[in-house]
Amino acid sequence: MAYKFDTSRKLEDNMRKVARDQIEAALHSLSHPGDHPASAIHDARKRLKKLRGLLRLVRPGLGDTYAEENAALRETAHLLAPLRDAGVLVKTIDSLSDSAEEHEGAAEILGDLRRWAAARRDGEMAELEPERRRAEAADALEAMRARAATWEIDGKPGKVMRGGLKKTYKRARKGHDAAKEGGGSAELHAWRKRVKYHHYHCRLIAPAWPEALKARAGMAKHLAATLGDDHDLTVLARVLEEEAEETGLDAAGLRLVQGLLRTRSGLLRQEALTVAPQLFVDSPKGLAKRLARYWALASPA
């Protein structure tokens, strides 16, 4: 389902259509996991994040509806999050394979660690009752689909959009400032979420000026992905610290993996701070006004 507004539709109509499309796509993934349940969960969680991004864009015009629906989406996401988290260690260990080539014995150590992480994942998945979680998430989304058809925007579309754009971009910009000052893993993870929402906002209004807004959305997506990869490294480092004995690795093996994690994390954070300045050069008020104006010019509805 395309995650973008139609310049021929009014803002309220766009909101309802995008919400319906994303809910139905999430429902399809939850109901048809097939042979790749992890991919289905990943897709459903992406749809939930896109829905939250949509709500943030039109937040100034939603009144109490925003808080109610955002809370509902957060609860649904919490149902599915453990299913994703169970498999993140394997994916993160795989991302270290290129870094391991320079270290003798690293490939074998990572192979042993991956086997432990895969067994850990399988054990957790058996306890998490994935079918029940998918069913409960689907029920929540079915109820939201009915409510979304009646969502209303109160206020002038241009003012509503400016407010939504400004709030999310301002938070992302503050996250950049915190990162420049040496923010830790928690601050970087929070920054990543704000950047992701800004990315979604640029995608939604991209039809107003595809050349400029698609490029901006791509830059934000790359930054968010870089910060997300760094967060996964942080999770793996924490698990290794807490469950060192269970991994079966000796002290030297653990030190080697921890060194690979630090090196990879440092590179990712450096990359994020290199990319970010171009994205956050504008003031929140100036950027929101400009992007909302693009939409107003392209959408006479």
Image (tube, rainbow, N blue to C red):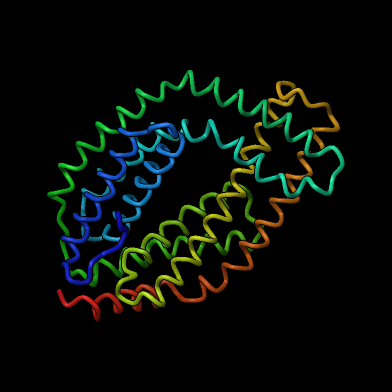
Percent x, y of residue 292? 30, 74
Q: Residue at x 34, y 38 (%)?
A: 29
Looking at this view, name the residue that lies furthest to the front: 35
Pick whichever, 266 or 207, lies toward us: 207
Give whichever of 230, 6 is nearer the camera. 6
> Among all residues in the image, which is located at the extreme bottom?
297
Residue 298 location (% of width, % of height)? 24, 78
* Residue 167, placed above or below residue 111: below
**Which residue occupies 29% across, 79% down?**
293
Q: Quadrant of the C terminus?
A: bottom left
Residue located 82% across and 36% down the image: 255
Residue that sits furthest to the left in the current view: 150
Q: Residue at x 53, y 30 (%)?
A: 86
2 left or right, relative to 280: left
What is the total number of numbered labels drawn onto the structure image?
0
Place residue 233 in its image quadrant: top right
Residue 133 screen position, x and y as percent: 36, 27
Q: Where is residue 206? Give x, y as percent.
A: 34, 70
**Which one is nearer the viewer's eye here, 191 or 128?**
128
Q: Is residue 224 left or right of residue 210?
A: right
Q: Nearer the viewer, residue 92 or 282?
A: 92
* Image position of 287 (left or right of 300): right
Left or right: residue 126 compared with residue 116: left
